[in-house]
Image: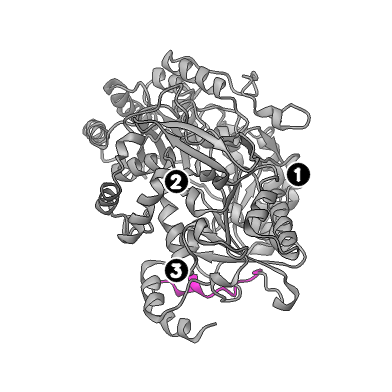
Amino acid sequence: MDQRIKRILPTVQKPARYVGGEYHEIIKNKSEVGLRVAFCFPDTYEIGMSNLGMKILYAVMNRMQGVWCERVFAPWGDMEDAMREQGIPLYALESGDPMEAFDLIAFSIGYEMSYTNVLNMLRMGNIPLRAADRPGLEHIVFAGGACTYNAEPLAPFFDFFSLGEGERSTEEILECYRAAKKNGLSKDEFLREVARIDGVYVPSFYEHSYNDDGTLRAIVPQEGAPATVQKRIIEPLDDALYPTDIIIPNTEIVHDRVNLEIMRGCIRGCRFCQAGFTYRPVRRRSQELLARQAQELLERSGCHELTLSSLSTSDYRDLPGLIDKMQAYCVPRKINLSVPSLRADNFSRELMLRLQQVRKSGLTFAPEAGTQRLRDAINKNVTEEEILETCALAFEGGWNNVKLYFMLGLPTETDEDVLGIAELVYKVLKTWKERAKNKKRGVRIHVATAYFVPKPFTPFQWEKQITPEEYMRRQRLLKDHMPSRSIEYNWHEANLSRLEAVLARGDRRLAPVLEEAVRRGCKLDGWDEYFDYQAWLDAFAACGVDPDFYTTRGYGLEELLPWSTVSDGVHTAYLKRERERAYRSETTPDCRTQCSACGASCLLKGGNCDA
């Protein structure tokens, strides 16, 4: 380790974030490595080390002969200040080498509010921000992750994006680069080669033009690039690499436990949920494989908590049978099994009894809306009766804490719907009074509301976002109607969610805004300690960009959207039909009940999803 780093570590918070040397980290002999990848997560160590995609792709790349993938995380402000003062560039944890020592610089981007971290990390690593300013084959910068489905605000900074699931495409990308390096190709020649890989989007190969009113006029492919780039998926899921020798963190992280991914995709089709559409089609891992992976993960990590992970865990076929297999190993060893992402319409007494064999984990449900009309409009497919009966089962089983998540600002929402949240919460409280077996401990009902952000690739991608002022009015209306000591109410930051909506639906004209925001000190925007909304407003003003163009304006149904070059497999016509049904408050059955012909199953070789 650089002696300068050793000197500054005692002066910063959580120095364990910056030292590496963890159990199961991968160290290779540089003389035997022909390709080095700096795998960057644009947030702090404790966030990045909890990220499942990082764990999987770290293993994928390091299992390739002659490739060494190392981790790079965004430093906290105190560490960044100390590094700049000492002239220390951003470095990888495994070797301690600076980012500029690596061939490829890969980012995993899952949250729009990390965009300034991406630019700040490149700047700290002495990597030119714009792809056009990196003419050679060294320092190729690419990214994958949820945000790459609309990567246009980041397009000028990246050489290419990897869309969808990266277990196989990442290997293909690295082999393509290795061949380009061996054969002495130019950067342009390499980009033309990598663009031939399914799921790879090279933004410089697409020319964007705009109408006088600011809307997008045309996207014209160049260099023989395809008109549409379709995401990659893995099937069957049992064949996908899932590492069980994961790195054991040096310090506490956000998810300080073992996570086991049991399925991908979601059968539900909630109309606001981007992940529910972009992760289609549904695929699941077999119980036998999951039982083996769970045991290996627990034995190799020493963790005493196992979490079953997916978008909708309780929709896994024969979940009770899977839990029985897990508990046969966990219970004798006092290992707690937690199952998040439960739904109120399939939570049962049988499931509850299975989950509390070691200790009671918290129960969280997301009704999302307070009235049945609005729940039908967003296709939540859960009734008030199911919500209350689920809470009753939990209270009878000894739970005294429940978390309920809602959204404010959903399309078609009225004040009646807002007040419906308060009414539903009070009915939950009444249910506890009537059905709880242990009332001495009291009850805590945690209510949280998020500010609705319309996201690409959902039926609501065209919708207007309500203003922050209107969101706060609705938040105050709700708060005033929930005056109970048993109810704890929290809400999302309005300005942050407005900015998230701008970046989620933005185009390439936001790139100068991002640069300006970083110049004004914006970073770690997902953290309250650092989010500076005024600096962002100043950046928009300096660049002559109106944030409302991407939020309260909404998008026309026939308008060309910035993300039109990308396909997640779900047909736009299907999204429009779902939007029409939302305005009629009509539900669509889940995929298991009836296929709604969204188009995603065409990504599968057999044409049938595993719903």
Q: What x and y, as percent, mark residue 521?
A: 32, 61
User: Residue 46: within the magenta?
Assistant: no
The answer to whether the residues at label 1 and label 2 have Cβ atoms under 8 Å apart is: no
> Gap between marks 1 and 3, in whole Å?
39 Å
> Gap between marks 2 and 3, in whole Å?
20 Å
Residues 196 and 261: in front is 196
Looking at numbered disc 3 in the image, what kind of residue is underneath it? Met
- Mark 1 or 2, which is nearer the eye? 2
Give the mark nearer the N terminus: 1 vs 2.
Answer: 2
Determine the secondary structure under disc 3: helix
The answer to whether the residues at label 1 and label 3 have Cβ atoms under 8 Å apart is: no
Give the mark nearer the N terminus: 1 vs 3.
Answer: 3
Residue where numbered disc 2 is placed: 153
Looking at numbered disc 2 in the image, what kind of residue is underneath it? Pro
| Magenta region, residue range | 13-25
Residues 40 and 589: in front is 40
Label 2 crowd (10 A; few <14 / some 14-19 / many >=20): many
The vertical placement of 202 against 459, above or below, is below
The answer to whether the residues at label 2 and label 3 have Cβ atoms under 8 Å apart is: no
Determine the secondary structure under disc 1: helix
Residue where numbered disc 1 is placed: 238
Residue appearing at x 50%, y 28% in the figure: 270
Q: What x and y, as percent, mark residue 107?
A: 55, 56
Looking at numbered disc 1 in the image, what kind of residue is underneath it? Asp
Locate residue 508: give its quadrant.
Answer: top left
Residue where numbered disc 3 is placed: 124
Label 1 crowd (10 A; few <14 / some 14-19 / many >=20): some
Q: Is residue 303 left or right of residue 434?
A: right
**Render colour scheme:** one colour
Q: What x and y, as percent, mark residue 29?
A: 72, 77
